[in-house]
Image (cartoon, rainbow, N blue to C red):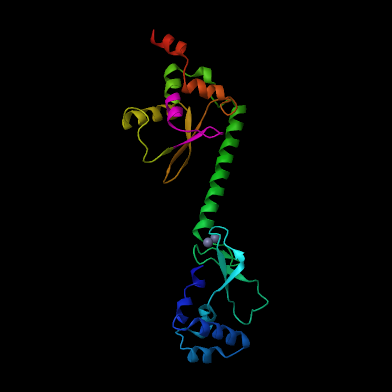
Amino acid sequence: MYKYLKYRNRINHLSKQKQWKLLCEYYRGENVQSLIQKYQIDISPSNFYLTLHLVETSTKICPYCKINMHCIPSTKTSYPYLVKKYICKTCKHTINCGECKCHNCFDKKQKIAFTKRLQQNSHQESSNKRDDGLININELSFKEKIYLGTLLRAYPITKQCLFTISRNTKPFAPSHLYSQKILSFLINRGIIFQTAASLIGVQFAINIQNIYKNNQIIYDLMYPKKSLITIQIF
Ligand SMILES: [Zn+2]
Ligand SMILES: [Zn+2]
């Protein structure tokens, strides 16, 4: 996309009026070499059209910045048959310039890929369910339940029972070491498993049967019944 902006400053020494005049003369069919000389532009004839000034248009709005985009002048041989190309001067988003590589489109693609991966994971889990790969909540020991409940209280979970632990998060147990111990314990027992990792944090899913459908399971883990604790202590 930067090729569309790279040479635009080569006509900065011209007034806006002259820039318009240059554009008109070019499309009227003036010889490129003589235009380069006349307006003293430092550019090769083949790249000349890339110096022409971008024309702001209110007909195309950048979907990300919500501002007017600019029409990119094409070569006079392709004009006016070519589909018009547009660029957003702020985020460099482009339209009709092939695959857009602006950071907004990149983020969007990444999010789509991430969601797809999550869906694949959850599909994988439903097949596991048939193989009885998921753990029944009643099979968990007291310690496993308490550890899982501690995690659930510390991190908000999504509808699909996923939760993310940020990289710079405070420990959810009395110390970082203890937090790490709890995490490793639950991972080793197959109670939670990692679904994704990014610079922001690590995402986990909970490997418990029916936890997606049954909020009561989550509630009981987060707020264990007094009787459960009493039985275990005494
Ligand atoms: Zn934009
Ligand atoms: Zn884009």
Asked if residue 150 lies in the magenta stretch, the reply is yes
Position of residue 49 measured from the top left corner of the image (x, y, whole percent): 54, 80
Position of residue 14 measured from the top left corner of the image (x, y, whole percent): 47, 84
Q: Inspect this view and state whether residue 7 appears.
A: no
Q: Quadrant of residue 150?
A: top left
The answer to which of 146 and 16 lies nearer the viewer is 16
Q: Quadrant of residue 75?
A: bottom right
- Residue stretch rendered in magenta on the structure: 149-164
Is 102 located above or below residue 78 in the figure?
Answer: above
Using residue 103 as the reference point, say whether residue 179 is left or right of it: left
Is 33 located above or below residue 10 in the figure?
Answer: below
Position of residue 208 measured from the top left corner of the image (x, y, whole percent): 53, 26
Question: How many numbered badges does the structure rendering display?
Answer: 0
Asked if residue 101 lies in the magenta stretch, the reply is no
User: In which quadrant is the C terminus drawn?
Assistant: top left
Using residue 166 as the reference point, say whether residue 34 is left or right of it: right
Q: Residue at x 45, y 25 (%)?
A: 148
Q: Which residue sits furthest right?
A: 81
Q: Quadrant of residue 215?
A: top right
Q: Residue at x 61, y 65 (%)?
A: 60
Using residue 166 as the reference point, say whether residue 36 is left or right of it: right
Is 90 located above or below residue 183 in the figure?
Answer: below
Q: Residue at x 42, y 30 (%)?
A: 154
Position of residue 76 measured from the top left corner of the image (x, y, whole percent): 61, 82
Q: Inspect this view and state whether residue 36 appears.
A: yes
Q: Residue at x 49, y 58 (%)?
A: 103
